[in-house]
Amino acid sequence: MKRIIFITIQILFINCYSQKNESNTLKSKTELENYVRVNSKRFAKFELKKIHDFAPESDAQDSICRRIGDSLKINEYYYKADFDNNGLLDFLLIGDDHNCDESRSIRCNFCSLVLMSFPKDSVKMYNINLGDGCFVTKIAQKNNQTVLQIYNRRRGVLSAKGNNVEQHTLIYKCDGFIDYNKRPVKHSIEKIEFSTFGCYGTCPVFSLVIDKERNSTFFAERFNFGTEEENMKKMSSFFNNNREGTFKTVITEENYNQILALLEYMNFANFQNENMLYEEDSGSSILKITYDNGKEKIIEDYGIVGSYSLRKLYELLFELRMNQKWN
């Protein structure tokens, strides 16, 4: 079974990969596979694979994956598009990440990736899966924009029949694929507070507070610095309440505005107050946003993957620990 330590940490840090490459020269199945494998440890075994090339379904979830793929006529290894209208070729890749080799089920190995092309031969790779399971992806047009339509099994519904499929429409925005929203609402953000909590591994545990003047405090509890191997060796000392420290800075205007732009587009005030990802070793988080003269929005997220837009917001908040000059 896929380890959720990848979902809670790797989605945030490996959701996007940036490399120098001429994506327009990637033409064959082998070239695309090799590009992914070379540029990503997380997808070092990635194989382009059609849904029907997976082993026969082993349970209701696999059956749902095949049914979705058949209904959408998803029968190719990859598709081409231009998601950000920059005139350069992007790729939607469909395949097997071999992250669950003890089980060859579709739901445990199915993976959708996007290779985005930018000027100066820059390429970024984005993981479209939102947690564990089969996320079948189709390119579509919406209001003259190229979008991704994602179809997956509705959480908590295991039957192979009935109302068990949910759909998301994603747009490339804020340097990521987030939930499409045709009516963004602007708010006056007064404070952002974000805290994470532990898992059974080395999930980073920390809190961030950011006020409207961009003043920020970073409370580092454990597993925020060093490699996973280094943190595993220090695990016992962390649980003896040896905190990593408290740091302060003024968030750069660029990073702060990126967060505000995402909050404005995603209509955070309408989000569910609680999100659940039912896995044993997933981390969790609490996001509190104070806005519009003291209004508060609190989102508790068990799994830290509540939605595509929230996942991107969490990624930006996680990155602040490393891309700011903390004192």
Image: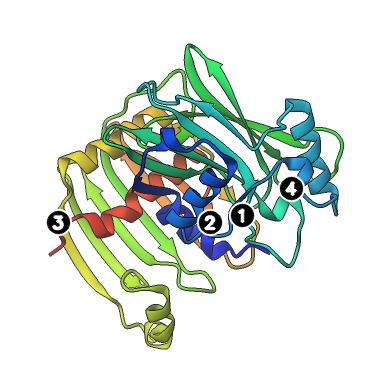
Q: Is residue 143 left or right of residue 73?
A: left
Crowding near the residue tagged with mark 4, few <14, some 14–19, many ≥20 C-alpha atoms within 10 Å:
few
The residues bearing labels 2 and 3 have C-alpha atoms spaced at a distance of 35 Å
Whether residue 78 is visible: yes
Q: Where residue 110 is drawn, which disc sits there?
A: none
User: CB of mark 1 within 8 Å of CB of mark 2?
Assistant: yes
Above or below residue 151? Residue 186 is above
In the structure shown, which secondary structural element does the residue marked by tag 3 occupy?
Answer: strand
Q: Where residue 156 is drawn, which disc sits there?
A: 4
Amino acid type shown at disc 4: Gly
Residue 302: horizontal and vertical position, in percent? 55, 56
Above or below residue 139? Residue 194 is below
Q: Where residue 97 is drawn, which disc sits there?
A: 1
Judging by the rendered image, the residue that carries numbered circle 3 is 249
Q: Nearer the viewer, mark 4 or mark 1?
A: 1
Report the quarter where the C terminus lies: bottom left
User: What's the residue at 52%, 44% (across, down)?
Assistant: 32
User: What's the residue at 42%, 74% (across, down)?
Assistant: 228
Residue 239: horizontal and vertical position, in percent? 42, 83
Q: Mark 1 or 3 closer to N-term?
A: 1
In the structure shown, which secondary structural element does the residue marked by tag 1 occupy?
Answer: loop
Q: Mark 4 or 3 closer to N-term?
A: 4
Q: Mark 1 or 2 closer to N-term?
A: 2
User: CB of mark 4 within 8 Å of CB of mark 1?
Assistant: no
The residues bearing labels 4 and 1 have C-alpha atoms spaced at a distance of 24 Å
The residues bearing labels 1 and 2 have C-alpha atoms spaced at a distance of 6 Å
Residue 217: horizontal and vertical position, in percent? 21, 59
The residues bearing labels 2 and 4 have C-alpha atoms spaced at a distance of 27 Å
